Amino acid sequence: MTRPFGDASALALQVWRRNFEVWVVTWRTALVSLAEPVFTFLAFGFGVGAVTRTVEWDGRELDYASFVAPGVIAMAVMFQSFFECLYGSYVRMYYQRTFDAITATPASLDDVVAGEALWGMTRGVIGTTSTLLVVWAFGHAWTPSVVAVPVLAAAGGLFFGAAGLCFTGIVKNIESINYPLHLVGVPLYLFGGLFFPLESLPPWAQAVSLLNPMAYLSTALRRACLGDAGPVVWLTALGLALAALPLLALAIRLMRRRLVK
Amino acid sequence: MPPGSTVPPGSGPAVLIRGLRKSFGAGPPAVDGLDLEVAPGSCFGLLGPNGAGKTTTIRVLCAASPRDAGEVRVLGLDPAEEPRAVKARLGIVPQMDNLDPDFSVLRNLLVYARYYRIPAPEARRRALELLRFVRLEDRADGSVEDLSGGLKRRLVIARALLHEPALLVLDEPTTGLDPQARHELWERVRELRRRGVTILLTTHYMEEAEALCDRVAIMDRGRVLVEGAPRDLVRAHARREVVEVPAAAGGGGADLGGPGDEVEVHGDRVLVYTDRGEEAWHRLSARFPGADLLLRRATLEDVFLRATGRGLRE
């Protein structure tokens, strides 16, 4: 089997649809998970914003709330998709045996993994859109270039969803999910230029952040929210989407190794 | 009527397994040269103690596990070569329920039908019909979480029949169910048999195999030990009747049998397998007056225990 995504087929969309319909049915808990970015925006916007009124970023002087709003959107992309494909997928795989149920039908495990990644991407978009509504409510990001936000969210969501699935393929048990979550996820967003400009880091840390996908995502989101949807923004989306593909191929292989015995 | 697309007679066995081998890492193989044949339209029981290789065998033929060696044909297809085609014609009821807890009873079936590409109106028609078949029609809009173990099992069976499979695979379908739920489920399985669905089931329960199966294979350590119709197996391996004698009364035990009888000591009982039970019972009663003797019909359980040994398994 040399095809990158194995035998993933259109049935992946039915896996996606199943997850989407569960999300609709369980909308109350779904809403709760959307509260986090709202709280973050309020805390950072008002709290930190009161201490640090302005921030210099990309040669501009920004009020802190305008600066942090796209950061909170970036956080929503990552946490919704990464967490969904880690914790959510693990629960479906192990506790609910949903993967077993689906793979007993003509759908294959590769379909399931691809469907889960697409669902992770969707969670990223949903989380971003709802966060954007809050950001708008506070008068930020009122610009046509904001159309790039859901596109960036989709690309970033696919990337972090696929990354989450890679970890789901290898974590030992549900407690072990804390390792990728706290040792990978948390540093990526804390040092991803979400809450402070990366330029305030020492040079070596700035160099390290060149490897951080969140740094690219937050920069592109910030440009889009500030009215500058230039080629860099769209290239970032393309780059994240392309980078997601080998991760998805890897996730399919790790999941096969875990489940096909 | 629902489930019933059978393999036409003369088109070969529904399941054919020759020399199947399958190992997991080091240690003894889980399946070690297994041969099996399931005739279309029949109900075949795969019996064996824990770790005998039943579930591994089922997983291989359901295209869930790759095999190491041997030939496997399910409805004429090789599950390793054509997994999707095989799975499209199999209905699988797994050991552990894997219903969607967030969906209603009916929704579980409708969502599942999509993986078989059954058009929505047709899926709804079949789902409602199957809910009547498993007597869950008044729970259609209820939550799956509110169903008892037996009702969940019935829903899983309905789900496995949505695409009208040619072969229904039941992996320990009644483990953990109370007697009422078990009998209710047997009734449904017998009804499916009457409709001509080929059934392959694994079970620990010998009375279940006797109640449902035309043929059974008793397996252990990855191989088939004995195979045949339950009644023939009992005749061949456990005679007609059994007299149980307390070991305390029966001394050594080996001399308890009459001509042609077979005697086995099992813990605190001596078992005399005989074709002339009443005669043996009278003879042994005279010999051990006052002892608590038991005369009973020989069962598949006797065959099972004789074939697989009485030692406890983990």
Image (cartoon, coloured by chain):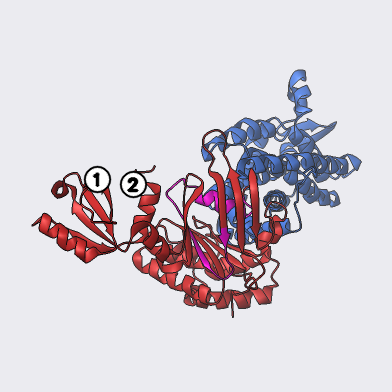
Chain colours: A blue, B red
Q: CA distance from mark 2 to mark 1?
A: 9 Å
In the figure, is residue A228 to the left or right of A248? right
What's drawn in magenta, residue-wise?
Answer: B37-64
Are the residues flagged by discs 2 and 1 in contact, CB closer than 8 Å?
Answer: yes
Report the quarter where the N terminus of chain A lies.
Answer: top right
Residue under label 2, please give it: B310
Instruction: Residue B256 in the image: state x and y as whole percent.
Output: 20, 52
Taking the view exactly as shown, the residue that stands out farthest to the left is B290
Q: Which mark is residue B217?
A: none
The quarter of the picture where residue A64 lies is: top right
In this view, which residue lies farthest toward the right? A231
| Amino acid type, label 2 | Arg
| B126 falls in the magenta region | no
Relative to A87, residue A195 above or below: above
Three-letter amino acid code at disc 1?
Gly
Q: Which mark is residue B267?
A: 1
